[in-house]
Image (tube, rainbow, N blue to C red):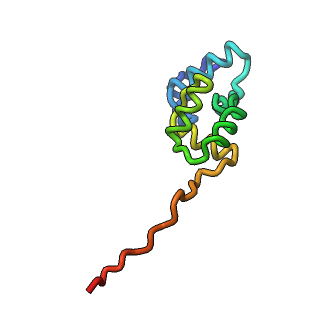
């Protein structure tokens, strides 16, 4: 492309990519001087910034549901997260999600009363 002897469509076909991909590469080459891939990945969950507060909430409310933890975190920090995010955060912090029974399990009912 830099030599002017090829078109965007031909380069896209040669590398089996879309035209817009080749156009992005050209813009990157022109603005940054290279076509090295950028770093992949997203940002760290904002909940991790409040992990100490979340652990304290967990210690005080061990039997809360994920929805309740979301509400408790919001009440304390003003940060609202989804239940999915809260679940992933619990996994990252190695906090258990298994709840304890508050009452013993009932034995099976005796069906023969005759």
Residue 73 pos. (x, y %): 59, 31
Position of residue 106 in the picture relative to residue 8 (left or right): left
Residue under the image location 51 percent in, 60 percent down = 103
The spot of residue 49 in percent (x, y) is 70, 28
Horizontally, residue 114 falls left or right of residue 110, namely left
Task: Locate the N terminus and report the quarter of the image it occupies.
Answer: top right
Residue drawn at x 72%, y 34% is 52
Q: Position of residue 113 (x, y in %)?
A: 29, 83
Q: Quick one: 31 or 85, which is closer to the camera?
A: 85
- Which residue is at the far left? 114
Q: Which quadrant of the structure image shows residue 79?
A: top right
**How many numbered tags mark residues here?**
0
| Residue 40 visible to an observer of this rendering | no
Q: Nearer the viewer, residue 12 or 40?
A: 40
Q: Is residue 102 above or below residue 43?
A: below
The answer to whether residue 51 is left or right of residue 10 is right
Rendered position, 78 above or below 87 = above
**7 to 31, vertically: above or below:** below
Q: Residue furthest top?
A: 31
User: Residue 4 or 85: which is nearer the viewer?
Assistant: 85
Q: Name above or below for residue 91 compared with residue 102.
A: above
Quarter of the image containing the C terminus?
A: bottom left
Image spot of residue 58 (x, y percent)? 64, 41
In the rendered image, the residue lying farthest to the bottom is 114
What residue sits 67% from the left and 14% below the top?
Answer: 30
Q: Judge whether residue 29 can be spotted in this image.
A: yes
Q: Residue at x 64, y 51 (%)?
A: 96
């Amino acid at each position: 492309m830099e030599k002017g002897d090829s078109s965007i469509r031909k380069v896209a076909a040669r590398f089996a990519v879309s035209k817009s991909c080749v156009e992005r590469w050209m813009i990157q080459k022109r603005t940054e001087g290279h076509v090295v891939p950028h770093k992949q990945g997203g940002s760290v969950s904002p909940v991790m910034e409040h992990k100490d507060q979340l652990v304290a909430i967990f210690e005080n409310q061990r039997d809360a549901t994920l929805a309740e933890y979301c509400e408790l975190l919001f009440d304390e920090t003003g940060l609202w997260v989804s239940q999915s995010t809260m679940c992933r955060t619990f996994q990252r912090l190695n906090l258990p999600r298994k709840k304890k029974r508050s009452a013993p399990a009932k034995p099976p009912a005796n069906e023969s009363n005759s």
